[in-house]
Amino acid sequence: MKIIGIRDEKNRYFQGIWEGENVRVLDFLTGRVIGEKTLDRVRWDVPVRPTKIVAVGLNYRLHAEELKMPLPEEPVLFLKPSTALLPHLETILWPSQSERVDYEAELAVVIGKEAKNVSVSEARKYILGFTAFNDVTARDLQKKDGQWTRAKGFDTFAPLGPVIDTEWWPEDTTRIRLKKNGLVCQDDTFGTMIFSVEQLVSFVSSVMTLLPGDVIATGTPAGIGPMAEGDEVSVEIEGLHPLVNIMGKKPSKTTEEDPESHG
């Protein structure tokens, strides 16, 4: 089953089941089928509305090496707010506080039922499916702050989707790539992940209760880098629908305010 998010003519959010050239529209609260659309008349939205986005840092060996950081003994977790979500084909907004905004291609796990203290062997039972994710990061602010909330929490900094595939599963040889303006910038396989999908679901559920629709972003491969305004970035995972977004305009420099003007 392929689950997508859509907006109707009144800007109302719905989920849908994508089947060929048609989309069965679902009521978001009840899951009941309430209509049907052709795919060419769909306005994309995020395929799920999570209560939280749990992201994982340093989960690919070469990425840890490029940052000159030791391999973690346990998953490194941080949170991105749901207000950072951005649909497929929409524009990433460049925050005025930042001079450098980076892409980070990731595989996203979508939780299917409430999970707390789940074992690794049972983790698959709690997964609804998978989709693509871009952990957009204001790299200069990440270095400046020493922790990651501001750098990764801006509105539009969590592109997600466009399709949750409930039948696909990542293999060690499955490739994840990020293309910027058609050129490959990140390219790796899931076999180089430090912690597997099952290990991540188990570990996160030992820390916090995962609710249906919650997202775990499983970390990014080596090759992270900056975007310029107008760049098209595509997260491409073999077997899943690519996630494409555009980098927005960099804000103009403004004259700094006189500190005394604030009293």
Image (tube, helix red, strand yellow):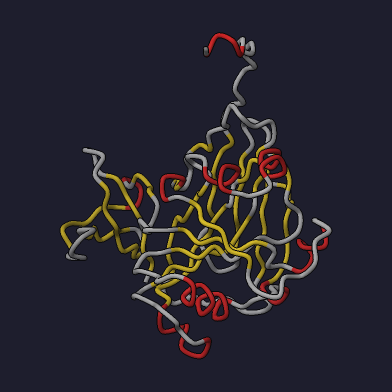
For the N terminus, the quadrant is bottom left
Q: What residue sits 22% from the left and 60% below the top?
A: 26
Please tell me whether residue 63 is drawn above or below residue 10 in the rendered image: below
Residue 181 visible, this orientation = no
Residue 156's spot in the image, x, y percent?
49, 41
Task: Identify the residue at the far front of this view.
Answer: 263
Is 111 left, or right, of 257 in this rendering?
Answer: left
The one of 208 and 112 positioned closer to us in this rendering:
208
Is 258 left, or right, of 132 in this rendering?
Answer: right
Task: Identify the residue at the far bottom of this view.
Answer: 121
Quadrant hosting residue 188 = bottom right
Q: What residue sits 69% from the left and 35% below the top?
A: 100
Please tell me whether residue 124 is drawn above or below residue 163 in the rendered image: below
Residue 167 visible, this orientation = yes
The one of 36 and 108 positioned closer to us in this rendering:
108
Quadrant hosting residue 111 = bottom left
The one of 90 and 138 positioned closer to us in this rendering:
138
Quadrant hosting residue 239 = bottom right
Disc tally is 0
Please tell me whether residue 113 is drawn above or below residue 36 in the rendered image: below
Residue 13's spot in the image, x, y percent?
27, 48
Residue 190's spot in the image, x, y percent?
66, 73
Residue 11's spot in the image, x, y percent?
26, 39
Q: What residue sits 73% from the left and 46% below the top?
A: 225
Please tell me whether residue 193 is drawn above or below residue 226 in the rendered image: below
